[in-house]
Amino acid sequence: MLSPIVFNTRRVRRTLSNSKSLSDGKRVSVEGPNLGEKDCKVLVNLVQEFGQETTFHGMNVMLAPGVGKFERALSTIAFVVAFILLVCVCLFLASRFSKGQFKTVVENTHFPLYKVKYPEVTICNKNRLNWSRLLEAKNKFLLPAHRNNSKEELFTEIIGLYDTFIFGKFDRFAQLEQYPLHELNYINFTAVARFMAWRCWEILSHCKWRSHVYRCCDIFMERRSQLGFCLAFNSVERPKTHNNNTTWPWRTDRGGTYAGLTVKVVLNKQQHFTGGMEGITVMIVEPNVWYYIPMDIPGQTRTRLTMDGFLNKYEDETRRVPSSERGCVFKDEQNSDDFKTLYGHRYRFENCHAQCQQEYLIKYCNCTLDIFFPPSPDPHCRLVDLPCLAKYNNYLVNFEIPGQEKYMSSKYPGIVCSCYVSCDSLRYYVAIKSRDLTEAETVENRSIVDLDVYFERDFITKYKTILVFTWIDLIVSFGGTTGLFLGCSLISIVELVYFFFIVAPRRIREEHERPQQLKRRPSRVEQSKIKLRAYRGVYRAQGQF
């Protein structure tokens, strides 16, 4: 007599065989279902099979066969709630990423001075012209027929208007409308102003750089600016003596009066135009910057300009945000709509501003004043164009940012340009310390300015601007969120894609290609169901013994 264990084993095998035969026979004997029902049945089996193998938390209980209704409903509700929360959090993360918010942090509070360029120091006599060269200028620029008559007087009057001429003071030319300007239109008055401008040896002396004595004309050069023709130290338009100097513009490694620039400016009052103002104008800018707000310094003073520098750089990852939203422009973003700069110069906010001024000059008067801007292909204003500048002076004085007109009312519209700061900007904050010269320091019949320009500290502060939410932050946040709510990973996503985009189409295609009269092997889900029914039958049979 066979033992119960052997008997039960054989009974199970026989039951499984019979169930399989019945299952297969059922498929052979009856008409197969239509195509849609067959696909749905295959998909249902595949979903159940995926639920048994997936690493998504809760899906094995929700999709596995033989699970009670309560457990299946509970797992389904939990999965749906977790999935909805996952979608909401992911949408919030995507919105945060798309906003492209920035934050500026201190990267280094002791950034060495030698790693940044020493500023360009531009010195201008408030009286731009040396009137001792007036006679020579008349002989050089006036035709012989226009000398010793009213044309010569008009020439002198126009030169007088150029003496203290700065950008935005075009209204002084309104009085020229009553004169026959076309008769002197052959004269290039920018060239006249350059000819009569102060030479470096005429107003500069006792030049020192980092305690080393230099000839002033070796380290200062003539430079155009919106103040006219001035003299600049450490300009990128380097003097000829420094053409082969790879370290130009110069730098300094420490602060203090002995590590900066020292120069004595001599104001020759006897060579000034009658009624001229006494003093100098100093402009301190980063090299490559065309113009910035100047500082007026009176004569007969000893003045120290102490500087503190602030360097700010936007990280390269911020490039994914448009420059208009970023609020800055990289120097190599020539394809950006916001990239605008002077001809032949790098992008800087000040250069964008100056180029915008040129465009408005061309817009109103079809010319630009080359005395205030670097040489460019744009047409230059001649004498007959000066009254036009006076006519539109009120339109060329103010610089407006787009959107400002909502809050600032003005009778005349200003120069409206979308100029943004440079993404690698260096700023100098200057403090002026001035005192009157003592009797021992003065020079008879001459007004003097003793000027010292230096950094106050041996270091500057460096900032960097970064994105609050980067690609890496987005990926990490997505990964943490999916792990929190569904307990899945990237491998789980791959499983899902593989199962429903590779396994499912392949299984459906095989089902369509197999002849209907042939038997097919049951799927793993069907095999599980058959085994479960067989074991239940065995257990019931054992209960009868």
Image (cartoon, rainbow, N blue to C red):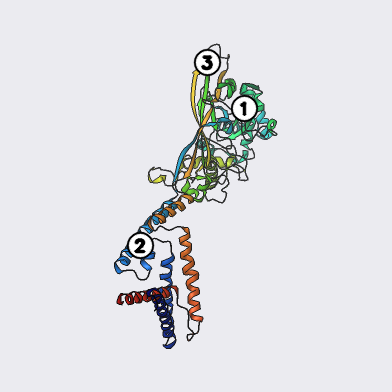
Looking at the rendering, which quadrant does residue 12 occupy?
bottom left
Q: Give the percent coordinates (x, y) of residue 208.
A: 62, 22
283 shown above or below 25: above
Q: Give the percent coordinates (x, y) of residue 287.
A: 58, 35
Residue type (three-letter) at the residue carrying disc 3 = Leu
Q: Judging from the image, what secondary structure is the residue with disc 3 in?
A: loop
Q: Which label belongs to residue 437?
A: 3
Pointer 1 local density, CA inside 10 Å: few below 14, some 14–19, many at least 20: many
Quarter holding the C terminus is bottom left
Q: Find the distance from the CA under tag 1 to the CA under tag 2.
A: 83 Å
Q: Nearer the viewer, mark 3 or mark 2?
A: 2
67 shown above or below 101: below
Of labels 3 and 2, earlier in sequence is 2
Q: Find the distance from the CA under tag 3 to the CA under tag 2.
A: 84 Å
Pointer 2 local density, CA inside 10 Å: few below 14, some 14–19, many at least 20: some
Of labels 3 and 1, earlier in sequence is 1
- Front in this rendered view, residue 150 or 463: 463
Answer with left or right where residue 343 lies relative to residue 438. right
Q: Judging from the image, what secondary structure is the residue with disc 1 in?
A: loop
Q: Find the distance from the CA under tag 3 to the CA under tag 1.
A: 24 Å
Q: Which label belongs to residue 274?
A: none
Q: Which residue is mark 2?
A: 79
Q: Which residue is mark 1?
A: 198
Pointer 3 local density, CA inside 10 Å: few below 14, some 14–19, many at least 20: some
Could you tell me if the residues under marks 1 and 2 are in contact, i.e. CB atoms within 8 Å? Answer: no
Looking at the rendering, which quadrant does residue 40 occupy?
bottom left
Is residue 33 among the parts visible in the rendering?
no
Q: Nearer the viewer, mark 1 or mark 2?
A: 2
